[in-house]
Amino acid sequence: MNSTRKLTLAAVLTAVAIVGSILSFPILGSRCAPVQHMVNVF
């Protein structure tokens, strides 16, 4: 994988994590953001 493709993938995943951070919900006093955790898995 070349460096341009890696950089593009990182930028797309960052954008998805930022937009997905809107979707969070409180559980036992903490906020859970499932989209951000999914990006970390990828």
Image (spheres, grey):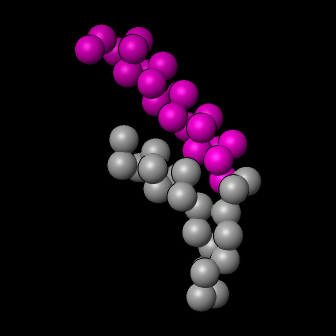
Q: In the image, residue 5 lies at what x, y percent?
A: 39, 14
Quarter occupied by the C terminus: top left
In the image, is 23 to the left or to the right of 40? Answer: right
Q: Quadrant of residue 18?
A: top right
Q: Farthest residue in the right direction?
A: 22
In the image, is 40 to the left or to the right of 31? Answer: left
Residue at 65% x, 47% y: name it.
20
Q: Farthest residue in the bottom direction?
A: 28
Magenta region: 1-21
Q: Is residue 40 above or below residue 14?
A: below
Label total for image: 0
In the image, is 31 to the left or to the right of 7? Answer: right
Residue at 67% x, 63% y: name it.
24
Q: In the image, residue 17 lies at what x, y percent?
A: 58, 44
Q: Main secondary structure of the magenta part?
A: helix
Residue at 59% x, 61% y: name it.
33
Q: In the image, residue 34 lies at what x, y percent?
A: 54, 58
Q: In the image, residue 31 lies at what x, y percent?
A: 63, 73
Q: Quadrant of residue 30?
A: bottom right
Quarter occupied by the N terminus: top left
* Residue 20, magenta (yes or no): yes
Q: Is residue 3 above or below residue 20?
A: above
Residue at 48% x, 19% y: name it.
8
